[in-house]
Image: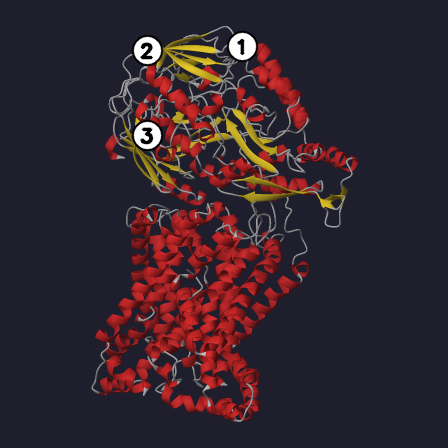
Amino acid sequence: MDVVAGVLPSTIQLAAVALVLGVALGALLAVATVLPRAAWLRQLVSTLPPVGVALPTFWVGLILLQVFSFRLGLFPAMGDDGVASLVLPAVTLAVPAAAGLSQVLSRSLREALGEPYVETARAKGASRLRVQLGHALRNAALPAFTMLGLTVGGLLGGTVVTETVFSRAGLGRLAVTAVNSQDIPVVQAIVVVSALVFVTVTLVVDLVYPLIDPRIAVRAPALAA
Amino acid sequence: MTSTTAPSTASTSAGSTRRPGSGASTPSAPSAQAPLATHAPLPEELEVLEPSPDGVTSAVMEPAAARGASHGLARGLGARAGARLRSLARTPGLVLAGLVVLLVLAWALVPNLFASGDPLTGVPADRLAAPSAAHPFGTDHLGRDVYTRVVHGTGVSLSATAVAVAIGLVVGSVLGLLAGFLRGWVDEAIGRVVDVLLAIPSLLLSLALITALGFGTVKVAIAVGVTSVAAFARVMRAQVLRTSTSLYVEAARAGGVRWHSVLLRHVLPNSAGPVLALTALEIGTAVLAIASLSFLGYGAPPPAPEWGSLVAGGRDYLATAWWLTVLPGLVIVALVLAVNRVGRALERTGEAR
Amino acid sequence: MTRTTQPPARRTRPTTARHAVVPAMLSAGLLLAACASPGTAGSDGSGDATDGASDGADEATPVEGGNLTFAITVDSHCIDPQQVGNNDAIAVARQTVASLTAQDPETGEIVPWLATSWESNEDASSFTFTLRDDATYADGTPIDAESVKTNFDAIVALGAKASLGSQYLAGYEGTTVVDEHTVTVDFAAPSAQFLQATSTFSLGLLSPATAQLTPEDRCTGDFVGSGPFAVSSYTQDSEIVLEKVPDYAWGSEANGHTGAAYLDTITYTVVPESSVRTGSLASGQIDATAAIATVDLPQFAGDGFWSTYRANPGVVFSLFPNESSPLGGDKAVRQAILKGIDREQVATTLLTEEDQPATSVLSRSTPLYTDLGDALAYDPEGAKKILDDAGWVEGADGVREKDGQRLSTTVTFWQVPEPLELVQQQLAQIGVELNLQHVTVAESQAIKESGDFDFDYYNLTRSDPDVLRLIFSANARNVNKREPAEVDSLLDSSATITDPTQRQDVLAQAAELLVEDAHAIPVYELSTTIVAADHVHGLGFEASSRLDFYDAWVEGGAGS
């Protein structure tokens, strides 16, 4: 357990940065699937999330290493210290998260845009951009918010490959070393820790959800009835 | 990680999260446990790409779905076939995806037809040659033709995928069926198991299983298969709950039809659509998971050309031989993309039923 | 000594010849109180080339201070000098201990370090060392005769955990404290290798307090050494930081200075991915490493980097058959495999120009080496004939069979797989299926101990030919797990001969027998290449190709 605790900070740092990146990128993509007036642009952007979901994380990491570290020399290849060394692994980890989030988000965004309040807002003279970003996105974000637990779980799983590819110390690489040396207690500890993280995040989401969306408290029972 | 949850999550939780509580339309199915089911009955469920006129609520949908299951079925068949053809023409992407899947299947079945060379023996003098007419994917560090290795590695990689998905499908469906049909404490118990499986990131779960099982293609396949059990169980359970509470099933039961006949004649056929769609999506997920694990070195030992280990073998040559990682990786991406595309199409037809 | 870490793919390229390897005659016991001045350059001899590409390190005036970040490939979860056996761990452990003697990397001569002089009796079974009187362990305890005894007794007590040290002390009868600064080490039988062994890290001295600790605690860095650096922190699988011992003032004559080390700290970063090591060195995240893949070396030729190459002395990378297993015990199979390997192709395909295919069980930079190249020539037809004659006939899938048994065997290894993949491909040509079982360092150790393997694969670096006896003799490690044979008497007697010419003769006969019966199937010689950024100076090798950071310094000192 000590070993696990020792590497946890590094993994949490990586996963947190990846989460922020993933959410930002996911939201950006989702908005880009509805926002542009040009249909071809919307079409083009909407092909990205399915591609993102289909990319093997280890491969993305290797390609990023190759392009940004070797060909362009922009980012360092390894290390646990410094913001620069965090960029490539965090992007690698964020790709599947962003892709998944943007798929959910753009669905609910389109739904939200069909809701009456959007019409109302438009009728009141709010600009298209304001409606889409201000009203619809905020409401559409709620369903995506409930995915947080799964997303964080996915990120933790993703560190196994990402930390290996980038030779970073952390939970994921510890898992690989532990499996290689058949160190069952360490593997168990890692599994328990990651499950705890998932459960905690899910719990927090459940608790926070009604607070940020008061409709839920009213609506859910209504539907169930 | 890449995979296991991402694709299915994207589509499954979309349904449930969109209208929280819609699962309640099937009595006793807590929404959190039956996400796919909630959007399965939508006749007009839209793919991510196409904007939809929404506004329909599941409350409205539900009766329609129940109807569709009984008398709507016959009515729709002929019309749907025509519609499907027409929609096929409108979706070149889907056609392309189908072709990719067929090509990869052909690689797996008759690799020699596509690459007649020896995947295991190379010419050391020709090592690390860039892609050319003679070697479309270049050669590796021992002078082996990478294209030949990719083609010949398809069989191993796909059979591992098949084993993994089959485990998830069979075990998950049986669990879901039991839970949905027997209810009560069985449902509770299976529900807990599923919750636990879902709480552990799938790649870590696979690693834990590999620690116990050991290395090798079959073991990797089993480890990946177990991670998809939960998804199948949830979908199957939701379908069973939905159909078994529908009027016609209750009528059949009331009419004295034995439970296993009800199961076989009504419940299973009606669950097939969503489960089939999930299967397609899980294939993509499994391909990625298996590639990840064989990348980490838990699959077949060298010189077997498993896809993931092909990419893994190239990673020491990133600075000098890009083709070793890029090209086999692209093949994986193409297949997963294609399978997911087909899966989403199936999902929609399943829903349209 | 020890088995190597550096996988094959990373041999290579010449440069600075600060250290030439000279097969010196070092029969222990004969060299009394030799004094060698660490000469500057002069390359001569085997395996070492000069191209003056870079470095220039030695001309500049050393600067004190700063940190040097060095990438290693694997953390074997132990850095106790008396226990470790893996090259990466040795790169750390070596810096933390001083030894009784040192070995000059250029001449191979044994020179004073903690002992100012020594002598041995006629048959090399008793050695008396006179210690310098001012040296202390890092905790301030004086390095006296009593503590030397504590160390040797503790190493013998560690047994198999001190895989190398306990072998060096094989036949140990005891250490006698003559006076505060004089000790005598006695052996039951002649042990000609012992003097050179006292120069290795495996017999490096640790504070007596350390002997009280459990082997496990010592592994995690809880020991107090006698060298120029001490363990500052150790994070498993991540990094190890050594800091200099400011009071250290007893550098050996094999080094360039005698005071404290120049560097304040050395940070060893564990970087398993080859591509990441290359990228990190190129981007300046690390200052140096000895593990750059062959294919990536050209990008470090000049242009801000320098490199230095050294062929490792000792037993070359070889397949070691387990003769208690059915196939490993089949002499025809072993001989066919020996002839079926194209060593030249392995060297030219995967290694660099300086690297050599094996020409004996010992590498050519090992003292008392004898060339057996003819016996190791590639002879696929000969191999096929041996198998045909032994009744192994080709089966449907190209793999030979006999009495329903396929000629399919497995080699267990943890190093990079490329050379074995090529060997696998070559052996397929003669109808032998070689399966590759890639395991971790820890697993490979466990497998060795369990004896559950067909073929093992590694090398063993040591600058003394006694390594041959140590590995193969049925009375020593007996890697083949075989019954005693003619070769054992030769191997055992080699340890008792103090005359270099006679010893070489006996060793050559032994090596010939080992190759003839294929108890060893040599493949290629290991070498080590340090690649470093231009601001790094003085980083080099000790005589056994172990990395030596004592003379290393970085430009700008603390600024690095």
Kind of residue at disc 3: Phe
For the residue pair A56 and A45, the one nearer the viewer reads as A56
Mark 1 or mark 2, whichever is nearer to me: 2
Chain containing the residue with disc 3: C
The answer to whether residue C272 is left or right of residue C399 is left
* Quadrant holding the N terminus of chain B: bottom left
> Mark 1 vs mark 2: which is more N-terminal?
2
Question: Which secondary structure, mark 2?
Answer: loop
Labelled disc at residue C223:
3
The answer to whether residue A78 is left or right of residue C24 is left
Instruction: Name the residue at 37% across, 34% down.
Output: C219
The answer to whether residue C169 is left or right of residue C364 is left
Chain containing the residue with disc 2: C
Labelled disc at residue C498:
1
> Mark 3 vs mark 2: which is more N-terminal?
2
Mark 1 crowdedness (10 Å alpha carbons): few <14, some 14-19, many ≥20: many
Kind of residue at disc 2: His
Cβ–Cβ below 8 Å for labels 3 and 2? Answer: no
The answer as to whether the residues below labels 1 and 2 share one chain is: yes
Gap in Å between the C-alphas at discs 1 and 3?
A: 35 Å
Kind of residue at disc 1: Thr
Question: Which secondary structure, mark 3?
Answer: loop
Question: Which secondary structure, mark 1?
Answer: loop
Gap in Å between the C-alphas at discs 3 and 2?
A: 23 Å
Gap in Å between the C-alphas at discs 1 and 2?
A: 27 Å
Image coordinates for residue C48, horizontal then vertical, percent: 49, 23
Q: Which residue is mark 2?
A: C181
